[in-house]
Image: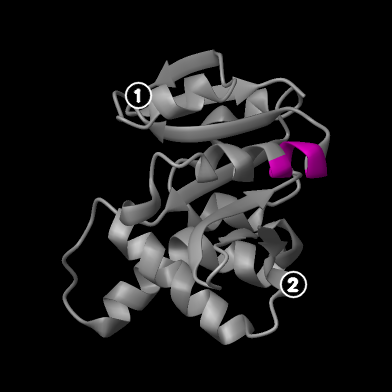
Amino acid sequence: MILRLTDMPDRPAALDALAAIFFASALRQRFADDAERAAFLDTWTGWYVREAPGDVLLWVDPDGRIAGYLTGCRDSAGAAALFDTILGYGVFADRFARFPAHLHVNVRPDRRDAGIGARLIEAFARHCGTGLHIVTGAGARNAGFYRRNGFTEEETRGPLHFMGRDA
């Protein structure tokens, strides 16, 4: 079942689950201390949780455990604060008119390959009703997943790779 963060009865527990999935999925695993670890999480999820919690979708298994999440923004051009927070956010700003919404998806390792990520993307696409995009690393292994989910417009600029999907 997909729920918005704003609909979660226990938001702190939902955010703890989101953080656990985030760190289980992150390439970076070592931090100098808890403050650095918290800052890393905040860089990649903080704006979405604070500014667009209705665009944060959670996959909740029948047992009540959160198995995956999508953080998104329906208006990338209008989210100027992200330009200062996420390194490289504005590199593809010229593509935002056609693909205004962006997203990030992560699923618990033990629940991957169950279609959860694809269902989260489809729910977000219906919610937005516009073109979507993601930015990942050039040569990143997640590109195949996004291609299978309709992200067929691609462009690489330096170390970053843009993938867009029409509405």
Viewer can see residue 76? no
> What crowding class fits label 2: few (fewer than 14 Cα within 10 Å), some (14-19), or many (20 or more)?
some
Q: Nearer the viewer, mark 2 or mark 1?
A: 2
Q: Secondary structure at mark 1?
A: loop
Residue at image point 39% right, 61% down: 22
Identify the secondary structure beneath mark 2.
Answer: helix
Magenta-drawn stretch, dominant element (helix, strand or loop): helix
Query: In the image, which residues are magenta?
Result: 123-127
> In which quadrant of the rendered image does the N terminus lie?
bottom right
Q: In percent of the image, x 54 and y 68: which residue is there?
A: 46
Give the amino acid at mark 2: Thr
Q: Is residue 59 magenta?
A: no
Mark on residue 13? none
Residue 31, x across and y down, in percent? 19, 71
Rendering coords of residue 124 (x, y %)? 71, 44
Q: How many marks?
A: 2
Q: Quadrant location of the C terminus?
A: top right
- Residue 6, which numbered label? 2
Quarter residue 41 falls in:
bottom left
In-image side of 130 versus 18 (left or right): right
Percent position of residue 120, x then y: 61, 45
